[in-house]
Amino acid sequence: MRRPTKRLILTAAALPALALAAFAGWSALRPAPEPPAAAGADWGDALSALRSDAAFRPLPPDWSLSLPADHGAHPAAPAESWALTAHLTDEAESPLGLQVVLSRYALAPGGAAPDASPWRPRALHRGHVTLTEAAHGASEEEERFSRGALGAAGHDPAAGAIVLDHWRLDLPRSKGTDTLSLSATVGAAAVSLRLTPVKPPLSAGPGAGPFRGYAVTRMLAAGTVVRDGVARRVSGLAWLDHLWGDLPPPGGPVVWDRLQLHLSDGSDVSATRRRRRDGGGTPAVDGFVVGPGGEARGLDAARMTAVGSAWTPPGDGAGYPLDWRLDGDALDLRIAPAVTDQRRAFAEPVWSGLVRAEGRAGGAPVSGVGTLNLTGYESR
């Protein structure tokens, strides 16, 4: 197995897709943090009310990616998120899709508490896990919030892990090691994975604006899914986005449709379609492609277009476009859901889950699996 030997810098042109990556599954969510905000207040308003008046310092201009240190938390940043997607198969070659997002919003610079009480929130933590099993048409999700008091959520430097209750992402802690591990539950299932990168990370540095971070677009994933006391071995590919900085809080006038694909030719594709929540204006598409050897390029002049009829959840008037075409820049792909109903019952519902891809890349036939996140459709 080839180990990464170099790191690639993600260009400013490709940044928007990466900058939104960690929030693609929850950019439209509007939960009420603890302590609860006034009724009707959205997430951004509640967050502003809890944060101190002190300004957060700008990120250092001379930053460059340093692993394994940058796998861990950056408490000086006002917000941070670790977002993992995995495209797996079990022993019967049945597809499974997994998403895990663990996020933090500081309430004061450096994560300091407004007072010395251990019960006073230093940050607001939000996480979600989704699991789709295509063979059974089953899809589950769970969403959690925490103030992080007494170590219930956040980065545990001693353990080298990101935790939210008993959801846990263990990080590499020393030079020469790059394997991560994940343990999480969702519904009646428990998932355990080991994740080993096979491509070098892409970094988003000072030229990218108020964000820092990296993406590891292809990792080998292997582990188990346990349901009703029965363990199945699973394996496949995973994608990790880790971002920190002045990340936009959930809500706001701009929402996103984001597609992440692992293709059969060894390429990885990220495409983000940004649009106004009210439906006005013209959507903009950007992203990047990482080739089989780890070479990266911006996704220029590509179109991400909904095709066919929108799917409407039972008893709801919202319509989600589940069939898409991504074309341009040597790609012509058709995207279809592996399971129709992957609508997530979060604080504000979104559609987020496993998809299949068929088409051509560089003129050659290609197939793939991926994750599609659709936000903002139910709030128009």
Image: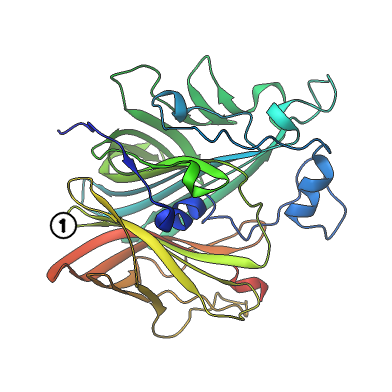
Furthest residue in direction bottom, as rendered: 309
The residue lying toward the viewer, choosing from 61 and 336, is 61
The residue lying toward the viewer, choosing from 322 and 341, is 322
Which residue in the structure is indicated by mark 1?
265
Residue 44, horizontal then vertical, whole percent: 74, 53
Residue 249, horizontal then vertical, whole percent: 66, 52
Q: Is residue 188 left or right of residue 155?
A: left
Q: Is residue 157 left or right of residue 87?
A: right
Which residue is drawn at the image coordinates 46% and 77% (left, top)?
321
Residue 351, horizontal then vertical, whole percent: 51, 65
Residue 82 at least partly seen = no
- Tell me the quarter of the picture where residue 333 sits: bottom left
Q: Quadrant of the N terminus?
A: top left
Which residue is drawn at the image coordinates 47% and 46% (left, top)?
207
- Tell me the quarter of the picture where residue 69 sits: top left
Kindly identify the amino acid type of the residue bearing the numbered disc 1.
Asp
Q: How is the image coloured?
A: rainbow
Residue 363 at least partly seen = yes
Furthest residue in direction left, as rendered: 364
Q: Quadrant of the C terminus?
A: bottom right
Furthest residue in direction top, as rendered: 158
Q: Is residue 293 left or right of residue 223?
A: left
The vertical placement of 287 against 181, above or below, is below
Please tell me whether mark 1 sits on a helix, a strand or a loop: loop
Q: Is residue 368 left or right of residue 34?
A: left
* Mark 1 surroundings: few (<14), some (14-19) or many (≥20) residues within 10 A: some
Which residue is drawn at the image coordinates 44% and 85% (left, top)?
309
- Tell me the quarter of the picture where residue 173 sits: top left
Which residue is drawn at the image coordinates 71% and 36% (left, top)?
56
